[in-house]
Image: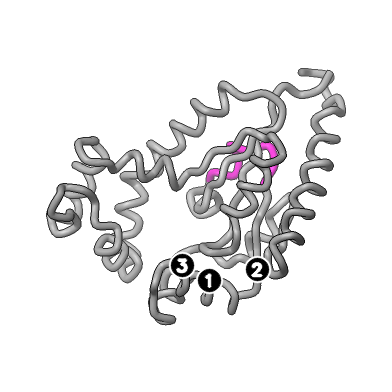
Amino acid sequence: MARSLIRVGLTGGIATGKSTCLRHFAALGIPTIDSDVIARELVEPGTPGLAAVVSQFGSGVLRADGSLDRAQLGRIVFTDDSARRDLEAIIHPGVFARLQEWFAGQRGVAVADVPLLFETNSQDAFDLIIVAACRPDQQVTRLMLRDGLTETEARQRIAAQGPVDEKRARADYVIDTSGAKAEAETQVKDVLEKIVGQEQRPNSQGEE
């Protein structure tokens, strides 16, 4: 019989087009979830997550209204590897707990966008891994335009994650987002067809 659920982890580097790929999967009727959205929810005002961040980094990471100043926190953690690891230790356990809860309610193919999938050694939590990748120069330009960063800041944030080429080598599927958006959409459709085909094959033990 077909497997009841295939957990797909979508990852890549910062600004390599993961969100675009996730939207394409959603448009095709596939259940999707974005880890970045979960992470933001975990540090909303009044949450234990925000309290832990303030305890670790000080009240200087708060805006006047009590919400998290993401730009200020980013300036801290993307220039200090130890600080970044401290932040990840606060946020990522909660993110992955939410992901597991979400996957438990899904059937068929379900896709989670997980930016730090390999960096947090979470690859074993997924049945298949897709990496969204683009040219390094595009990555820098996209990040500068999207977040209003200088080139130096953009390169710092890119360097804080694992190299995209290494992620490519570890992926089950790669979606190249270097070209037009329509090209990425076509690749998403092709990858989904392959995954669905795999879902419909019996596994080696004959289990569901």
Label 3 SS: helix
- Crowd band around label 1 with a 10 angstrom C-alpha radius: few (<14), some (14–19), many (20+): some
Residue flagged by tag 2: what amino acid is it?
Cys
Residue at point 78% right, 18% down?
Answer: 207
- Crowd band around label 2 with a 10 angstrom C-alpha radius: few (<14), some (14–19), many (20+): many
> What is the quadrant of residue 103 in the picture?
top right
Residue at point 23% right, 36% down?
Answer: 48
Q: Provide residue 183's location: percent of width, then percent of height.
A: 76, 61
Q: Provide residue 184's location: percent of width, then percent of height.
A: 72, 58
Which mark identifies residue 134? 2
Residue at point 29% right, 43% down?
Answer: 43
The residue where tag 3 is placed is 146
**Which quadrant is the C terminus positioned in?**
top right
Say whether residue 121 is magenta: no
Which mark identifies residue 142? 1
> What is the quadrant of residue 59 in the picture?
bottom left
Q: Provide residue 97's location: percent of width, then percent of height.
A: 44, 32
Marked residue nearer the N-terminal end (1 or 2)? 2
Q: Nearer the viewer, residue 45 or 112?
A: 45
3D distance between C-alphas at marks 2 and 3: 15 Å
3D distance between C-alphas at marks 1 and 2: 10 Å
Label 1 SS: helix
Q: Which residues are magenta?
A: 122-129
3D distance between C-alphas at marks 1 and 3: 6 Å
Relative to 198, residue 132 above or below: below
Residue flagged by tag 1: what amino acid is it?
Arg
